[in-house]
Image (cartoon, rainbow, N blue to C red):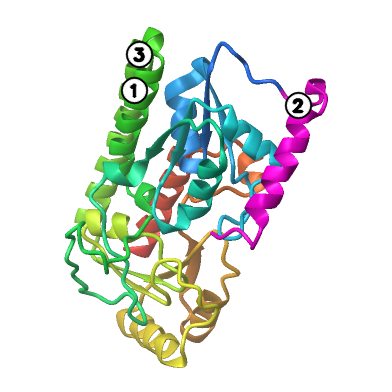
Amino acid sequence: MKLRKNSVLIILLLLMLLLSACSADVPQADAGRLQVVTTIFPYYDFLTAIGGEYIEVHLLITPGADSHSFEPTPQDVLALAAADLFVLTGGPSDAWAMQLLAALDTQPQTLELWHSVELLAEDHSEHDGHDHHHDHDHGHEAVEWDEHIWTSPKNARLIVAELAAALSELDELHAADYAARAAAYTEQLDELDAAFTQLIEDAPREELIFADRFPFRYFTTHYGLHAHAAFPGCNDKTEPSAAVVAELLDEVAAEAVPLVLYGEYSNGNIARVICEETGCGMAVLHSCHNLTRDEAAAGATYLSIMWQNYDVLTEALY
């Protein structure tokens, strides 16, 4: 996720113009509620569940937007300038957000959620194979950490606790409400976690074939699954090598894999090729990084999407 050259300067110039314009044309925040800005949908969903009517959450990367080519609008910058709290993952992919923060005269409290979990390293081999192991020494500068921390419900539990603590620190009057709502939400995450754990323990298979980029390292690691993917992490490649496709085809055929998976924003072309050659099925495993406009209109949530993933895995692993 990168800002094009001079984008920050242009946005700040627009911001100055907006601030000097008639204030009646600028949306006013509710002064009685905490103002929170966040980058991506999972954190927005968690914050909404925990904060309820006591906070106002502004989502930067809105449903339907491409999170990897996002550029903030002047309205986004205004919201950030007025925020009490800014929530993001942290790390290199959020460098654009830190640039915006640095350019503001007044900066909100910032919560980088990747500090709340045990980070796992991205694998930059040609594909994600069966048994890659990594040194998780957080001080190792050469390691590139996987930033898709929310994809595991076990991590989501830790993230929810961090968010509740941050809201409580800023708004002590409603701290008990934040804690109660976080506890209720955590119970739902625990139910989801238990269901995934039981499903995977009972499954005759322990490998996923992911014919796409692979944002599920935390999920597969936490639940003891292996993944064979066309690309590691959010690799910039658009097409896998012929050798990788051949390897995926061979494995699907040899293991009679029932379902090949791909991501929610993918065109599914690689999965389609594999299915045409082997006769297997294909389905989306949703990373919850962002929603489509239709999903948002239908009221999709982190929990509803993860339960959909449960149904997909029920087919993929049996």
Asked if residue 174 can be seen in this view, the reply is yes
Residue mark closest to the camera, 2 vs 1:
2
Q: Position of residue 203 (x, y in %)?
A: 24, 59
**Label 3 or label 1, whichever comes before in sequence order:** 3
Majority secondary structure of the magenta segment? helix
Spatial CA span between label 3 and label 1:
14 Å
Q: Nearer the viewer, mark 3 or mark 1?
A: 3
Circle 3 SS class: helix
- Where does label 3 land, which residue? 175
Quadrant of the snapshot with the N terminus = bottom right
Q: Which mark is residue 211?
A: none
Q: Is residue 73 visible?
A: no
Within-10-Å neighbours for mark 3: few <14, some 14–19, many 20+ = some
Q: Earlier in the sequence, mark 2 or mark 1?
A: 2
* Nearer to us: label 2 or label 3: 2
What secondary structure is marked by label 2? loop
Q: Which residue bears the numbered disc 2?
A: 26
The residue carrying mark 1 is 184
In the image shown, does 3 or 277 lie closer to the viewer? 3
Q: From this view, report whether residue 144 is shown above or below residue 199.
A: below
Sequence order check, earlier mark of 2 and 3: 2
- Magenta span of residues: 1-27
Residue at left offset 33%, top offset 37%: 159
> Callout 1: few (<14), some (14-19), or many (20+) C-alpha neighbours within 10 Å?
some
